[in-house]
Image (cartoon, rainbow, N blue to C red):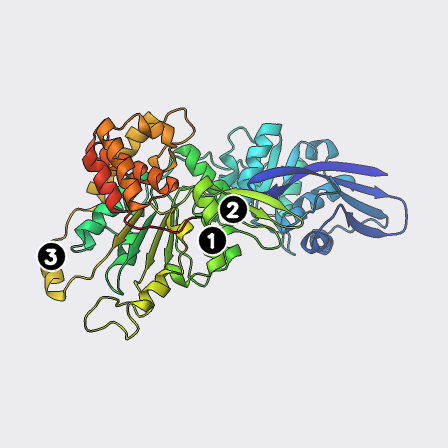
Amino acid sequence: MSLARLTTFSFHGVEAVPVEVQVQVAQGLPAFTVVGLPNKAVGESRERVRAVLSVLGLSLPPKRILVNLAPADLVKEGSHFDLPIALGLLAAMGVIPVDEVAHYAALGELALDGTIGPVAGVLPAALACSERELGLVCPASQGAEASWAGATEALAAPDLRELIAHFQGRQALSPPPPPAPLPREARGPCLSEVRGQESAKRALEIAAAGAHNLLMIGPPGSGKSMLAARLPGLLPDLTPSEALEVSLVRSVAGGLEAGRISARPPFRDPHHSASQAALTGGGPRARPGEVSLAHRGVLFLDELPEFPRPALEALRQPLESGRVTVSRAAAHVSYPARVQLVAAMNPCRCGYLGHAGRECGTAPRCGEAYQGKISGPLLDRIDLVIEVQPIAPRELARAPSGETSEAVAVRVAAARTAQRARYEGMGFATNAEAPVEALREGFEAAALAFAEGAAERLGLSNRGMVRALRVARSVADLEGAALVGRGHVAEALGYRLRKPAAG
C-alpha cells in the first residue's frame, strides 16, 4: 500500500481554506473513488486524470485507488482539484517523489491532452501558501498572479508532462517573473468632452473627492451616462493594499485576466435586468456579485427604477457596512463591497416630466409613481441627488470644452490625500466612511449649528444628516480648508433636498 499527500484549497468568500488531498493505492478490486463531499465537477476529475495518464503513456495500476479530500465535511467544488488529484496519484504510483509533492499545494484544470488550464482563486491560494510556507503549483498562464504572494515558490507549468519532468529532476521549470510594479493605465474618457453641465460636473467632482454615492435625474439624452462614465477618470489610483483587495475578489470570481493586477478602481455597469444574485452575489456556489466586483470602485446603475425592487433593496446593507453577506443553506459567505454607487434615472416613465411639449398625459402622477419605485431607505443612502437638464443644440455647439479629467483629478487627489492623513490609523480613508465622531472636530461651531437646524427643517434622518456632514467635509477638502464652514454645509445640503421615507 502506498499513500501520498499534498494540499489544495477550497474557497470561502475570498478566504482560501486548505484541503488535504490524500491518495491511497492499495490491494483490492480495481476501482478509482473520490470521497470527501466532492461535487459533480470534482467527481469528474477521475475521468480527466485517467485520460491524461493514458496520453502520457501511463496506465492506472489494477488496484483500489482511493482519493480522500479532507476535511470530509466541507463541500468541494470546482475543476481546480484535477491537478492535485493527478499529482497525488502520480506520487502514490511512484512516478514522482512522495516527499517532494508533500511540500506543495496545487490548483489547475486538466485538458485531455495534459494541458493545465486556468482556474479561479490562484491569488488567495498563493497568499495562503505563503502563510503556510508551501510552494504552489499552478497553470503557466497564472504564474504572474501567484508571484504576488512574494515568499511563495511557484511552479507555473504549461502541462502535466513538464511538471512530471520537473519533479523527477530531468528538467527544471523556470520560476514565474517577479511581480511588476502596478502599471499606469489610461483613465478613460475625458470630462472635457461633456459640454456645459457645470453644476453636474461640480457634483461629480465632490462625489469623487469623498467617494460619495450620487444619483442623477434627468430626461433622456441629457448626459447622465456620459457623466458617469467619466467618474473613474477623476479617481486616484488604488494603493497596493487596495489593489490586492480588489484582485482577490476578481481572482475568486475567475476574472483576473493573465494574473494582471490593476491600480485603477473598477467600474461596473450591470444591465437593469440583473437579478438580486447578480448584484449582491449568490447562486449555488455563493459567488461574488457586481457590488463586490466593484469593491473600491464605482457601481453604476443606469435606469435605476427598472432594476428589480428586491435587488435594489438588497444593496442597502452593503452600502452602509461595506460588506455583503450571501446566506445559503450550504454556505454563509461574506465578500467586501465598499463601493461608490452612481445611479441615473429618468424623472418619469416617458422621461419628459415637466417638458411643456413632450410630457405624457398622466403627468405629474407618472413621475410620482416612477420615482416611488426607489424606496426612501435606499434614497437615504445616496449623498448627492442632482437634476441634469438637457442643453439646447444651439448652446451645446457653442459651449466651451471645460476642464479635463486630469485637471480635476489633481484636486480630487489632493482632497483624498488630506483625508488619508486625517483618518490615519482609524481603519478608513475617505469621508464617505467617516463616522460622525471623526467629522465633528473639523466643523466650525456656527456651521455645525446651521447643519443641525437645517436638518430639522428639511426632515433629514440621522443617517441623512451624517451623510450631509460628510459631503460638506469633502467640499471643504476640495478647497483645502482646515475647517468646514457654513458655506460648505449649505452646498452639501443643497444636494439632499429630498425627504425619504423612514426605514
The Cα–Cα distance between marks 2 and 3, rounded to whole angstroms, is 49 Å
The Cα–Cα distance between marks 1 and 3, rounded to whole angstroms, is 40 Å
Amino acid at the residue labelled 3: Ala
The Cα–Cα distance between marks 2 and 1, rounded to whole angstroms, is 39 Å
Amino acid at the residue labelled 1: Glu
| Secondary element type, mark 1 | helix
Nearer the observer: mark 2 or 3; the answer is 3
Residue 170 seen in this snapshot: no
Nearer the observer: mark 1 or 3; the answer is 1
Q: Position of residue 8 (x, y in %)?
A: 65, 40
**Residue at x-position 63% and y-position 47%:** 80
The residue sitting at the right extreme is 28
* Mark 2 / mark 3, whichever is N-terminal: 2
**Residue at x-position 81% and y-position 46%:** 66
* Mark 1 / mark 3, whichever is N-terminal: 1
Q: Does residue 34 appear to the left or right of 424 in the view shown?
A: right
Q: How many marks?
A: 3
| Residue 111 sits in quarter | bottom right
Which residue is labeled 2 in the image? Answer: 141
| Secondary element type, mark 3 | loop
Q: Position of residue 300 (x, y in %)?
A: 37, 53
Q: Is residue 301 above or below residue 352?
A: above
* Mark 2 / mark 1, whichever is N-terminal: 2
Q: Does residue 26 appear to the left or right of 442 in the view shown?
A: right
The residue sitting at the bottom extreme is 361
Which residue is labeled 1 in the image? Answer: 313
Nearest the camera: 216 or 192? 216
Amino acid at the residue labelled 2: Ser
Q: Position of residue 100 (x, y in %)?
A: 69, 32
